């Protein structure tokens, strides 16, 4: 084996290393000391900044928000009940289906509905119509009789005036003759008076002439009185009055007035009967509608929402007031959340809340405000003087009632997207509620 020869001190270290390597039959390359790259330094800086930012947000969330332990969506349910008994012949809705207000849901048939009320009203209507026809016939008869009596009254007046005129003419003629005889009696009286004064005639002849004069004068006065009475009677006839009676005591003018009063009463009675018949017809129509409604009743949705529960099926017999199903009113929902009692002191009525629902294909986020805070769940029976004991190590939670914002309860809002597509408006879904309690000045400066 050859001896190791020490190299000169002036040779570089590399020569020594090569010699050592040749001794052992190995080849070793020279490697300088490693230095960390700029990329590694940048990565470390970014990781540190991310951790610092996450720590900052975590601390901020812990100081400015309160998270719920559990939360569930709740809502109002409207019960659908039938107003009458019968057999369900048609069901148009399904569980989870979207329902609009006044939409047809069920059809109930009952062919055993009583028709007695409609028949009774129909009989009463027929009787009233018969009475109306009789009253109209009586009125028509009296109207025709009125024409006859009216014609008789006109004829009576005309004939009475004509008769009076004829009587006046006769009296005037008689009065004229009587006046002539009266004038003759006056001449005879004057002649007899003259002859008596001369003694040419006897006393008896003078008395006869005097008596005849007085008699003729009385006749003239009587005829003049009769003529005046005829004039008065003519004036009465022209004014529709009668100063004398017929042998049958029949006066067309009086009968005319009587008929007019009777006709007015009959017309009023007919109008009353017409209104009665009209009211009975309306009652009969309503009775027919009620009968049809009892025989075939339709039940419509009282609210808009989704069908929550459906208990009625075609062919089922239901009693009056029986429930057929329930509708979940989507625009009247709320969230019940449970919060650790130690964090309730940070909450108050009106605190904003953000609700993130679980079990949805896309993250659904709603907003609202606290409306009720109810503590003592499971330990207190309100109104009683006893408290329910709980194990010391059991978690103690407070129930918080959250009213959703208006825009979140409307079916058209983006947060309620796909609300009606079979998910029952998310009622019953669980989630997590984040309450925004305060914002400190420290975090406001960042």
Image (spheres, rainbow, N blue to C red):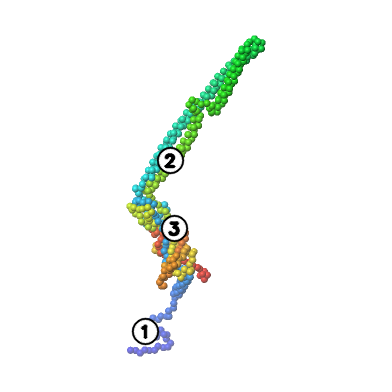
Q: Which residue is mark 3?
A: 331
Real-space CA distance between mark 1 and mark 2, rounded to the nearest whole angstrom: 134 Å
Q: Position of residue 13 (x, y in %)?
A: 41, 85
Q: Is residue 204 left or right of residue 36?
A: right
Tell which tag, 1 or 3, sits nearer the viewer. Answer: 3
Comparing 366 with 187, the one in front is 187
Say which quarter of the image contains residue 129: top left
Quarter that holds the N terminus: bottom left
Mark 3 vs mark 2: which is more N-terminal? 2
Disc 1 from disc 3: Cα separation: 88 Å
Mark 3–mark 2 contact, CB under 8 Å? no
Q: Which mark is residue 277?
A: 2
Q: Residue at x 59, y 20 (%)?
A: 221
According to the picture, the residue beneath numbered tag 1 turns out to be 21
Q: Earlier in the sequence, mark 1 or mark 3?
A: 1
In this view, the residue farthest toward the top is: 200
Residue 167 drawn above or below residue 423: above
Mark 1 near mark 3, Cβ–Cβ under 8 Å? no
Circle 2: is it few (<14), some (14-19), or many (20+) Cα within 10 Å?
many
Circle 3 SS class: strand
Q: Nearer the viewer, mark 3 or mark 2?
A: 2
Distance, label 3 to label 2, CA atoms, is: 49 Å
Could you say where residue 229 lies in the image, as x and y percent from the top left?
57, 24
Question: Which mark, residue 145?
Answer: none
């Amino acid at each position: 084996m050859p001896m190791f020869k020490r190299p000169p001190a002036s040779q570089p270290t590399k020569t020594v290393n090569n010699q050592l390597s040749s001794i052992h039959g190995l080849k070793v390359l020279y490697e300088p000391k490693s230095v960390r790259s700029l990329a590694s330094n940048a990565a470390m800086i970014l990781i540190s900044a991310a951790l610092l930012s996450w720590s900052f947000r975590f601390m901020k969330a812990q100081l400015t928000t309160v998270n719920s332990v559990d939360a569930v969506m709740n809502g109002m349910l409207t019960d659908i009940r039938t107003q009458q008994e019968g057999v369900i012949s048609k069901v148009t809705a399904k569980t989870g289906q979207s329902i609009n207000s006044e939409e047809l849901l069920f059809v109930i048939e009952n062919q055993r509905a009583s028709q007695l009320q409609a028949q009774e009203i129909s009989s009463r209507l027929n009787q009233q119509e018969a009475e109306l026809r009789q009253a109209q016939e009586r009125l028509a008869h009296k109207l025709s009789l009125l024409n006859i009596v009216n014609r008789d009254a006109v004829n009576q007046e005309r004939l009475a005036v004509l008769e009076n005129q004829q009587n006046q003419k006769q009296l005037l003629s008689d009065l004229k003759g009587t006046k002539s005889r009266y004038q003759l009696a006056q001449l005879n009286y004057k002649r007899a008076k003259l002859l008596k004064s001369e003694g040419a005639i006897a006393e008896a002849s003078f008395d006869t002439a005097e008596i005849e004069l007085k008699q003729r004068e009385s006749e003239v006065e009587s005829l003049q009185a009769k003529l005046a009475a005829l004039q008065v009677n003519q004036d009465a006839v022209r004014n529709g009055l009668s100063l004398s009676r017929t042998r049958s005591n029949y006066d067309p003018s009086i009968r005319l007035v009587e008929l007019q009063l009777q006709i007015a009463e009959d017309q009023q009675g007919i109008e009353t009967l017409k209104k009665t018949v009209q009211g009975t017809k309306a009652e009969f129509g309503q009775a027919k509608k009620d009968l049809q409604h009892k025989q075939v009743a339709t039940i419509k949705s009282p609210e808009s929402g989704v069908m929550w529960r459906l208990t009625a099926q075609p062919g089922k017999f239901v009693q009056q007031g029986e429930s057929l199903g329930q509708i979940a009113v989507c625009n009247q929902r709320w969230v019940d959340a449970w919060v650790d009692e130690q964090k309730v002191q940070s909450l108050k009525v009106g605190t904003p809340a953000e609700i993130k629902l679980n079990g949805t294909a896309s993250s659904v986020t709603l907003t609202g405000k606290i409306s009720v805070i109810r503590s003592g769940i499971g330990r207190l029976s309100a109104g009683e003087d006893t408290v329910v004991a709980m194990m010391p190590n059991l978690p103690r939670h407070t129930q918080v009632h959250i009213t959703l914002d208006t825009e979140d309860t409307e079916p058209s809002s983006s947060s309620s997207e796909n609300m009606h597509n079979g998910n029952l408006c998310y009622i019953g879904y669980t989630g997590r509620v984040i309450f925004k309690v305060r914002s400190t000045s420290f975090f406001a400066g960042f």
